[in-house]
């Protein structure tokens, strides 16, 4: 049985690598008043533009299509220039409760594609490599506004350069994206394209050092007994497993957060320091909606020289607007019911 599992794992992994989604043909894409060209997996925007650039940002959709639909509508009302999806599109991993993963990926991102705005996407730790590339590749044929930063080396836009770091550590043996492998394969060319600031789009956040940063894990203490579905959470109970408490946090139960632990990836912090990366977008911790720099948490609505943000989980109705103005950026939180 074990050998069989191993063989299957190896097969999944190999087919995953073999089906790497590459834009073989160079092509030009015109979206409204913007012109893009893709050559050798490098995306370049060639249109005229002016600052500020406004991005609608989501992460951790986890097949909550209805929430995604409402957020896509808000992005349109806010007149964002483009949309960014920071991974964890699938519900769990692979096909879940008889729903094919390809259907989940489509359901999760279709409403953003329907806005006709450029949509930049990466895979998180919940996507199966093979299925992700297959589904994104198919969607790209119907929606020329979809740009996959798990495949493209970078997006050299007017005013900002974006590169993606897909994946995480869970599910790796089953054919997921390895974040450490992804970091190794970053094309350093992105750091010397022009004078525009760099935006790192990584599903997993960098490691920070302070309380309340976007990479924090917590213990939570229940202050008032309450029910969530069929489960009862008793007053005084302490929960340290975030997969249990995220639903509680998102449900805004009466709780106290204690024992904050920074849990992001040091390799990503090293990249920030080495290449003086000014901005990043990450998800993975869906209740950590907010932003910080390397030392402290940042207020929304103010411009900063360095800003690393988490839009919160789209699965819980959270999103962000990120506005870049020359070498500064600000963020605003969105929350829908
Ligand atoms: Zn997630
Ligand atoms: Zn994740």
Image: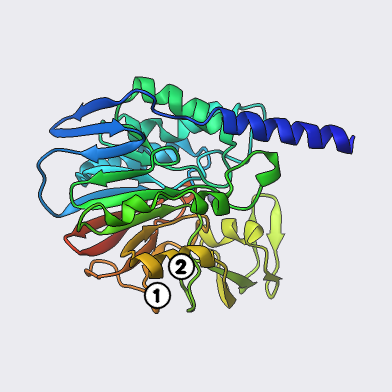
- Which residue corresponds to mark 1? 294
Q: Is residue 297 above or below residue 308?
A: below
| Label total for image | 2
Q: Residues within 10 Å of mark 2 (few under 14, many from 20)?
A: some
Residue 54 point in image, percent of width and height: 22, 51
User: Is 83 left, or right, of 178 in this rendering?
Assistant: left
> Residue visible at 19% across and 44% down?
79
- Which residue corresponds to mark 2? 269
Q: Is residue 241 above or below residue 3?
A: below
Decide: marks 1, 2 in contact (CB < 8 A)? yes
User: Is 239 left, or right, of 29 in this rendering?
Assistant: right
> Which-is-in-front pick, marks 1 and 2?
2
Element type at marker 1?
A: loop
Query: Residues under labels 1 and 2: Cα distance?
Result: 9 Å
**Residue 95 visible in the displayed image:** no
Element type at marker 2?
A: helix
User: Is 312 left, or right, of 96 in this rendering?
Assistant: left
Q: Quadrant of residue 335?
A: bottom left
Q: Quadrant of the N terminus?
A: top right
Residue 107 point in image, percent of width and height: 47, 30
> Residue visible at 50% across and 54% down?
183
**Residue 90 visible in the displayed image:** yes
> Residue visible at 44% across and 50% down?
186
Residue 62 point in image, percent of width and height: 53, 42
Q: Residues within 10 Å of mark 1 (few under 14, many from 20)?
A: some
């Amino acid at each position: 049985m074990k050998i069989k599992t191993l063989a299957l794992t190896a097969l999944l992994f190999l087919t995953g690598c073999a089906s790497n989604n590459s834009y073989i043909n160079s092509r030009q894409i015109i979206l409204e008043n913007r012109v893009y060209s893709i050559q050798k997996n490098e995306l370049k925007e060639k249109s005229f533009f002016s600052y500020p650039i406004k991005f609608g940002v989501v992460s951790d959709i986890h097949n909550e299509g209805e929430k995604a639909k409402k957020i896509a509508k808000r992005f349109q009302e806010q007149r964002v220039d483009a949309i960014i999806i920071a991974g964890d599109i699938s519900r769990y991993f692979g096909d879940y409760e008889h729903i094919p993963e390809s259907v989940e990926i489509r359901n999760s991102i279709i409403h953003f594609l329907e806005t006709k705005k450029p949509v930049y996407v990466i895979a998180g730790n919940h996507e199966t490599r093979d299925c992700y590339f297959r589904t994104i590749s198919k969607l790209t044929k119907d929606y020329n506004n979809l740009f996959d930063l798990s495949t493209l080396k970078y997006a050299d836009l007017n005013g900002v350069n974006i590169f993606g770091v897909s994946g995480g550590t869970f599910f790796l043996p089953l054919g997921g994206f390895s974040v450490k492998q992804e970091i190794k394969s970053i094309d350093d060319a992105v750091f010397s394209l022009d004078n525009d600031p760099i935006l790192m789009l990584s599903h997993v956040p960098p490691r920070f050092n302070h309380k309340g940063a976007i990479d924090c894990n917590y213990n939570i203490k229940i202050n008032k007994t309450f029910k969530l579905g069929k489960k009862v959470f008793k007053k005084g109970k302490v929960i340290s497993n975030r997969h249990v408490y995220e639903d509680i946090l998102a449900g805004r139960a009466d709780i106290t957060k204690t024992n904050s632990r920074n849990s992001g990836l040091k390799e990503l912090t090293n990249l920030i320091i080495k290449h003086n990366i000014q901005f990043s977008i990450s998800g993975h911790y869906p209740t950590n909606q907010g932003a910080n720099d390397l030392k402290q948490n940042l207020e929304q609505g103010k411009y900063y020289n360095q800003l690393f943000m988490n839009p919160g989980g789209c699965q819980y109705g959270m999103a962000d607007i990120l506005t870049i103005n020359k070498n500064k950026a600000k963020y605003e939180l969105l929350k829908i019911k």
